[in-house]
Image (cartoon, rainbow, N blue to C red):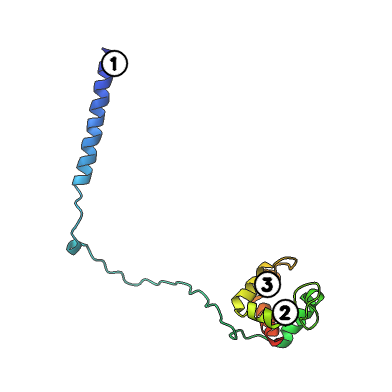
Amino acid sequence: MKGLKRNSLAMAGMAVLVAVGVACTSSSPTPAASETPSMTITNVRVTTPTPAASPTPGEYVGSVSQGEALYTRQCVACHGSGGEGGFAPALSTPDFQQRYADDATLITLMRTGRGGMPAYASNRLTENEVSDLVVFLRSLQ
């Protein structure tokens, strides 16, 4: 008798839950598209940062002389004084200039490194220094 009573209570509880669920969903009808409420918002200031556009080749404004000085300090030991290569690949060849014709690709190479070349993250080279290096490397053509 106990089992029958327990099953009856469980069934009654489920019926109540179903009834409440049906009542909740049926009491809030979905408005038709023409009945969608409208709202006017005033005095709101939205500030959305605009991402910096990726420069295309030739858009970097940097100092060739500053880039050369930085190249001498950071790159010459591996890439040679005129970018002719040595321990690391040559940077002044038409092949290199064509392979890295897109400044963004060249900057990615500088920032992430490759093979034995270390990564020059923003804590090692500033954006201005990167710009200076890009214009200097482009002058090696």
Q: Earlier in the sequence, mark 3 or mark 1?
A: 1
**Residue sitting at 59 percent across and 83 percent down?**
57
Q: Locate residue 123, reporting x and y percent.
A: 68, 69
Q: Which residue is mark 1?
A: 3
Answer with left or right where residue 5 lies relative to residue 65: left
Dot 1: within a 10 Å radius of its alpha carbon, few (fewer than 14), some, or many (20 or more) residues?
A: few
Q: Which residue is mark 3?
A: 110
**Residue sitting at 75 percent across and 74 percent down?**
89
Q: Disc 3 residue type? A: Met
Label 2: which secondary element: loop
Which of 48 and 70 lies nearest the eye of the viewer?
Answer: 70
**For residue 13, above or below residue 109:** above
Q: Quadrant of the C terminus?
A: bottom right
- Farthest residue to the front: give it: 95
Q: Earlier in the sequence, mark 3 or mark 2?
A: 2
Q: Locate residue 111, reporting x and y percent.
A: 66, 70
Q: Are marks 2 and 1 in contact (CB under 8 Å)?
A: no
Q: Quadrant of the N terminus?
A: top left
Q: Disc 1 residue type? A: Gly
Q: Disc 2 residue type? A: Leu
Q: Which residue is mark 2?
A: 91
Answer with left or right where residue 98 lies relative to residue 46: right
Q: Locate residue 121, reporting x and y percent.
A: 67, 68
